[in-house]
Image: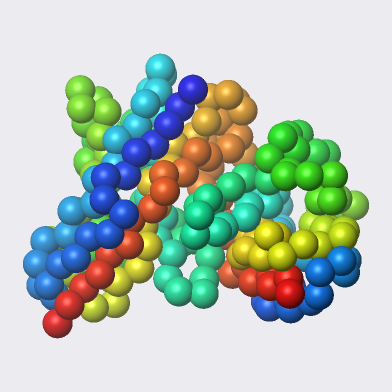
Amino acid sequence: AQSVTQLGSHVSVSEGALVLLRCNYSSSVPPYLFWYVQYPNQGLQLLLKYTSAATLVKGINGFEAEFKKSETSFHLTKPSAHMSDAAEYFCAVSDLRSGYSTLTFGKGTMLLVSP
Amino acid sequence: DAGVIQSPRHEVTEMGQEVTLRCKPISGHDYLFWYRQTMMRGLELLIYFNNNVPIDDSGMPEDRFSAKMPNASFSTLKIQPSEPRDSAVYFCASNSGPNQPQHFGDGTRLSIL
């Protein structure tokens, strides 16, 4: 069964600092991977998607993620944090058991940005 | 383009009452998903539909929960009777097929007193 592990339920950074949110997956076949962001009182919004076309994926708001098969990782980064980046971030993988129709989500990482 | 639309945004009701949550998916999307989000359990998939047909309802917690999709542009999630432990944020999402990103509505915040 596929699973997603997000290390750290909370990550704190200063404004302007590097953002690194970790995601590891388990999958027996090449996966489709996603990062979503959730702002307070809103639904999840797609940040970026990995589809095997390129290992480095650029998303919205300056975020990017790198797929590393050897490490089964898909970490999310942003060179310089902004106050508006404070939100909860979810990593997800398409679930083989449903024929890739559903997503398995990680438990989320809350990003806190201080001035 | 209109996104996924959910109503109501907030619902407060007393234990034992029937609750109906509504969702309008993005036009042209063949898949519709219902999720529940709580602090304790995170994001849980309750049920999903393909072309208006329920495919997997194994995530529905109890027989008190039911979901329907009478047509391609409308779905409901019903709880009858409601209990305080049903309090959560319920999300609807839709997409155009396997491996495609899911688009989420803004959710319904449900409080059962």
Between residues B37 and A102, which one lies in front from this camera angle?
Answer: B37
Residue A53 on image: x %, y %: 32, 33
Is B6 situated left or right of B105 in this image?
Answer: right
User: Of all residues shown, which one is farthest toward the bottom?
Assistant: A115
- Residue drawn at the location 87% of the way across and 66% of the way down: B16
Count of marks overlaid on the render: 0
Between residues B80 and B20, which one lies in front from this camera angle?
Answer: B80
User: Of all residues shown, which one is farthest toward the top?
Assistant: A28
Is B14 situated left or right of B40 in this image?
Answer: right
- Residue drawn at the location 38% of the way across and 53% of the way down: A108
Between residues A106 and B53, which one lies in front from this camera angle?
Answer: A106
Is B56 situated left or right of A63 in this image?
Answer: right
The quadrant of the picture occupied by the C terminus of chain B is bottom right
Residue B90 on image: x %, y %: 65, 61
Is B66 situated left or right of B26 in this image?
Answer: right
Q: Is residue A29 above or below residue A19?
A: above
Q: Is residue A57 above or below residue B81?
A: above
Q: Can residue B74 be seen by looking at this rendering?
A: no
Residue A79 falls in image quadrant: bottom left
- Residue drawn at the location 21% of the way across and 73% of the way down: A113
The quadrant of the picture occupied by the N terminus of chain B is bottom right
Residue B97 on image: x %, y %: 62, 39
Residue B59 on image: x %, y %: 68, 40
Q: Can residue B12 be seen by looking at this rendering?
A: yes
Q: Is residue A92 above or below residue A72?
A: below
- Residue drawn at the location 52% of the way across and 31% of the way down: A95
Give the color scheme: rainbow, by chain, secondary structure or one colour.
Answer: rainbow
Residue B61 falls in image quadrant: top right
